């Protein structure tokens, strides 16, 4: 039996354990792993490798409360999707919120261009898609990703994270074919305490992981 005891050593370790829980998808010719940058890419890299799947990124940006960006109140994703999850009883100033959205939209475009480096997106339509992140707190980021991915008509859509809040994971049950959350510790708090090593992922790391995955895939023999 796989040991899901916490904390995970790092994102790669968590990704290998997550792949074990997703083993029933291994070998499907239509399988695509979409990782949420930045932190989800190291997890998704291991999941894709273990399952023999294609790996791509899906860019999502959290929307923080103006002046207190650590409090996420929504998210945006590729395809113009926006999910709002406001703090109870608090309404941000519309102009300030518009500035936050504009800034995050610009960063979303920057990351798409940087990480893809001219490479086209991999078609989602008709595929079994596993969308991966390194953890799930409120679920706003993942909900935005799921909404945007569903617009592209996947055959199946699986949400997979190594660790998440009970509320965040359960809130996605009716949005996906399956939600795989290895552990839901209580109290949850944040993602980082559940990893021994949880450095801030960088753009260079994301690009290297994606390049390595493509290179490894290209070297695999074709049947």
Image: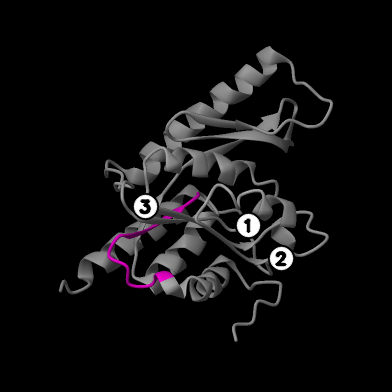
Which sits in the foreground, 213 or 184?
184
- Residue 97, percent from left and from top: 66, 20
**Residue found at the far left of this picture:** 223
**In the drawing, what numbered circle is on residue 135?**
1
Query: Is residue 78 positioned above or below 192 on the image?
Result: above
Mark 2 and mark 1 in contact (Cβ < 8 Å)?
yes
For the record, the magenta segment spans 25-36
Q: For residue 30: magenta?
A: yes
- Residue 61, percent from left and from top: 56, 37
Quarter of the picture holding the N terminus: bottom right
**In the drawing, what numbered circle is on residue 194?**
2
Which one is earlier in the sequence, the residue at label 1 or at label 2?
Answer: 1
Q: For residue 149: magenta?
A: no
Left or right relative to 118: residue 7: right
Q: Residues within 10 Å of mark 1 (few under 14, many from 20)?
A: many
Quarter of the picture holding the C terminus: bottom left
């Amino acid at each position: 039996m796989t040991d899901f005891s916490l904390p995970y050593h790092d994102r790669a370790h968590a990704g290998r354990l997550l792949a074990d829980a997703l083993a029933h998808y291994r070998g499907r010719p239509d399988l695509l792993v979409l990782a949420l940058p930045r932190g989800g890419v190291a997890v998704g890299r291991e999941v894709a490798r273990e399952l023999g799947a294609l790996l791509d990124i899906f860019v999502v940006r959290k929307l923080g409360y103006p002046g207190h960006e650590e409090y996420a109140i929504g998210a945006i994703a590729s395809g113009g999707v926006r999910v709002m999850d406001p703090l109870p009883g608090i309404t941000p100033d519309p102009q300030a919120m518009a500035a936050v959205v504009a800034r995050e939209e610009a960063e979303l475009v920057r990351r798409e261009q940087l990480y893809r480096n001219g490479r086209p997106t991999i078609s989602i339509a008709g595929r079994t898609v596993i969308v991966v992140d390194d953890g799930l707190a409120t679920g706003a980021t993942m909900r935005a990703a799921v909404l945007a991915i569903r617009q592209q008509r996947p055959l199946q859509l699986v949400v997979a994270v190594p660790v998440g809040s009970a509320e965040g994971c359960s809130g996605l049950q009716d949005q996906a074919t399956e939600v795989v959350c290895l552990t839901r510790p209580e109290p949850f708090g944040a993602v980082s305490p559940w990893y021994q090593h949880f450095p801030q992922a960088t753009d260079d790391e994301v690009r290297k992981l994606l390049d390595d995955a493509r290179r490894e895939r290209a070297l695999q023999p074709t049947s």
